[in-house]
Amino acid sequence: MLVLQGVSKTYPGAASRTVLAGIDLALASGEYVAIMGESGVGKSTLLNLIAGLERPDRGSILFDGQEISALPDDAATLLRRRAMGFVFQAFHVLPHLSVARNVALPLLLNGIGKRRMRERVAAGLAAVGLAGRGESMPRQLSGGELQRVAIARAIVHRPSLLLVDEPTGNLDSDTAGKILRLLRDQLHASGAAGILVTHSLAAARTAERILRLTPTGLEPHADSDREE
């Protein structure tokens, strides 16, 4: 479903810096993989490349048989809108919209009719434990509830790939554990593939496979039982 071959990214300038070098990755439909790495190693850049938000300097990224980096900007935007979902550390829930309207945004962008939209939003909120909270405003929710809204929004349009960037960095450990289990369960229920990038071994252990991102590439995590 997703194949990266020899992907490299260098940011030019006076302090030219190679962030990613020769990255190879294969992700099957329905697979959930965690990518660990220290801050600044390029985890978020890797997600941006997969999403088509940035272009690699070398290598190829194939998503459902399409070369993402070769797509025009409009086509890449349509692909993201249709086939990808995103969950971020900072939630990115729009404060001026109700919970239901936040969750409905991907459906609006994909032209889903109002009746089906209402049904999917209600189902999405129920799936993340927020049934009946659709009319609440984000300011009325806790951090854990906001991340649940973000997860519902990420899966409501039934994407085939979910990209998750440090989703629990703003949450306490107990809430973080609940969110990570919820995320895993929703991925399995939807059949979507997922990539979680994190510096946390505890978070990474909720995935089915753990890889470590280093300056020279992606490699299997050496010791999943070792504490951070």
Image (cartoon, rainbow, N blue to C red):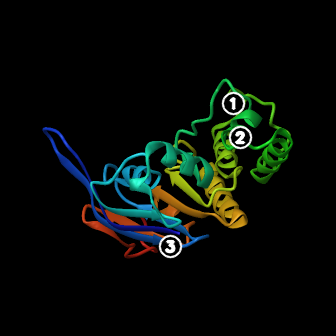
Under mark 3, the amino acid is Arg
Local SS, label 2: helix
Callout 2 touching callout 3 (CB < 8 Å)? no
Local SS, label 3: strand
For the residues marked 2 and 3, what is the alpha-carbon distance in whole angstroms? 29 Å
**How many neighbours does mark 3 have within 10 angstroms: few (below 14), some (14-19), or many (20 or more)?**
some
Callout 1 touching callout 2 (CB < 8 Å)? no
From the image, state whether disc 1 or disc 2 is nearer to you.
Answer: 2
Residue highlighted by disc 3:
209
| Quadrant (top left/top right/bottom left/bottom right) for the C terminus | bottom left
Residue highlighted by disc 2:
103
Under mark 2, the amino acid is Val
User: Which label's residue is closer to the chain start, 2 or 3?
Assistant: 2
Q: Residue furthest top?
A: 96
**How many neighbours does mark 2 have within 10 angstroms: few (below 14), some (14-19), or many (20 or more)?**
many
Q: Quadrant of residue 53?
A: top left
Residue highlighted by disc 1:
138
Under mark 1, the amino acid is Pro
Residue placed most toward the observer, 109 or 100: 109
x and y percent of residue 84 in the render?
Answer: 58, 53
Q: In the figure, is residue 216 to the left or right of 157?
A: left
User: Which label's residue is closer to the chain start, 3 or 1?
Assistant: 1
Q: In the figure, is residue 118 to the left or right of 199?
A: right
Callout 3 touching callout 1 (CB < 8 Å)? no
x and y percent of residue 152 in the render?
Answer: 70, 48
Q: In the figure, is residue 32 to the left or right of 227?
A: right
